[in-house]
Structure formats: C-alpha cells, structure tokens
Image (cartoon, rainbow, N blue to C red):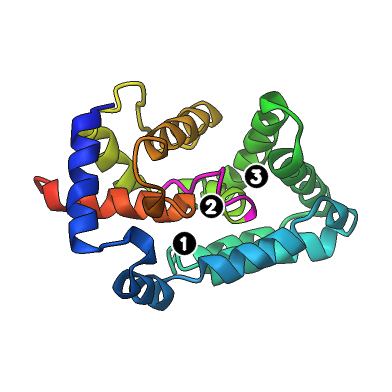
Amino acid sequence: MNLAKLREAQALFLHRYPGGFNNEEIQQVVAKRHNVGKLSEFAADRLAKRNFAKPGALLEDVVRIVSRSSMVSMFEKPRFRDHIRGLSRDDREFLLVGYERLLHGRGARKQEQGFNDVLDVLTEGRLAKWSLMTIHLYHLRPQREVFVKPTTTKNAIRQFELTELEYRPRPSWDFYARYRSVIAQMKAQVDSSLGPNNAAFTGFLMMATAVDDPR
C-alpha cells in the first residue's frame, strides 16, 4: 500500500468535503443515488439465520436485495431474478445451503465453501459477477464485508499500489478475503469520517482514483 498516496487522497477529499461523509453536500448526493441504509436494515432482518428454515421466502428476499440495490447493474437484476426463480428444487436447496454457509458460516473455510456453492449456481446462468457475489455479504454486514465493483477495485489496486492483490474477472474467495483485509487496513489509516461503512470508503477510493485515472 502506498500510504503517502492514500493520505494525499484523504487531504484532497476532506478539503472538498469537510467532515467527510458527514458533509451535508455529499450526504445529499449519497442519499439521492444510493439506498444503502434501508437495504442493509432489510438484509439484516430477512437474511437472518432463523429465516433459512423458510427456503422459498429466503430466496425471494435474496432476489429483492439485488432488485432494489442501486449498486447492481439494471441489466443484471432481471437476469438474476429469472435465473433464481427458474432453478429446480434441488438447485434451490443447494443454493440456499450455499448462502447460509456464505452469510452465517463459522470460519473462513465455511464461508469459502458457501461462496463457491453460490458461484457454481450463478455460473450456470452466466451470472458469475463480482457484484452479484458480494452484494448480500455487504448489505448484511456493511461495516465488515465489502462490495467489489470491478472498475473501482482495479483503479484502487493501480493507484494505491496494492501489490498483494491481483484482480481477475471471475470471482474467487481468495481475492475477496484479501481485498476485504486490505480495505480494513486502509480504513485504519484514514479519518473515520471517510469510512462510516465499507461502501462509503470504497466510494471515497472511487472518487480519488477517478481524478488520477489515465483513461
């Protein structure tokens, strides 16, 4: 990590938006574009472990989170919905177990197994996308988990010299776990107003890298 570049980006951001994400101007922008708070409350309620005893309702809520999220492409939303609703009974049960392991598994090994189970099902529908693999994780635990947006992630790796990360289009648990760890390390180096949740922090990185993007 290039700490000097991170702190330079922090200084520029706080100069433009004093108070970071507490700044009234940026709060209005975030409120207009995103519904992170309400959707995270919905996810905390509907994706709670107790609800995995109701497979039909649980998978419909999985679909609703994707459909309502401002962070998922509008082209991916109907494809995800149709794929999940079109699964066979056996595939739905397999997917349900995958989500339970991913979202509530104890230990990295269980989470990794769940990640791979969900990835297998989405791959069958040609939906093996970082956004669809990480949106439920993020909304369930926005302070810990991360939403992987490819452009933002690749630019952050480049600009802040995150040499321990090698981005690939196909989602993998190994990259996710490493990226989550790096985001936590970076957040620890900046003012807390830049990271009220992990989507806000990666939003800060997105704005910082957009200024320096050579394309």
Q: CA distance from mark 1 to mark 2?
A: 7 Å
Residues at marks 2 and 3 touching, judged by CB atoms closer than 8 Å = no
Residue 119, horizontal then vertical, whole percent: 60, 40
Q: Amino acid at mark 1?
A: Val
Residues at marks 1 and 2 touching, judged by CB atoms closer than 8 Å = yes
Q: Residue at x 71, y 65 (%)?
A: 61
In the image, residue 78 above or below residue 172: below
Residue 95, horizontal then vertical, whole percent: 74, 46
Q: CA distance from mark 2 to mark 3?
A: 12 Å
In the image, taking residue 96 as reference, residue 116 lies left or right, namely: left
Q: Which residue matches tag 3?
A: 121
Q: Residue at x 65, y 42 (%)?
A: 118
Among numbered discs 3 and 1, the one appearing first in the sequence: 1
Q: Amino acid at mark 2?
A: Leu
In the image, taking residue 154 as reference, residue 123 lies left or right, namely: right
Q: Which residue matches tag 2?
A: 132
Please give the range of residues in magenta.
140-148
Q: Secondary structure at mark 3?
A: helix
Q: CA distance from mark 3 to mark 1?
A: 18 Å
Q: Secondary structure at mark 2?
A: helix
Q: Which secondary structure is most common in the magenta stretch? A: loop
Q: Which residue matches tag 1?
A: 72
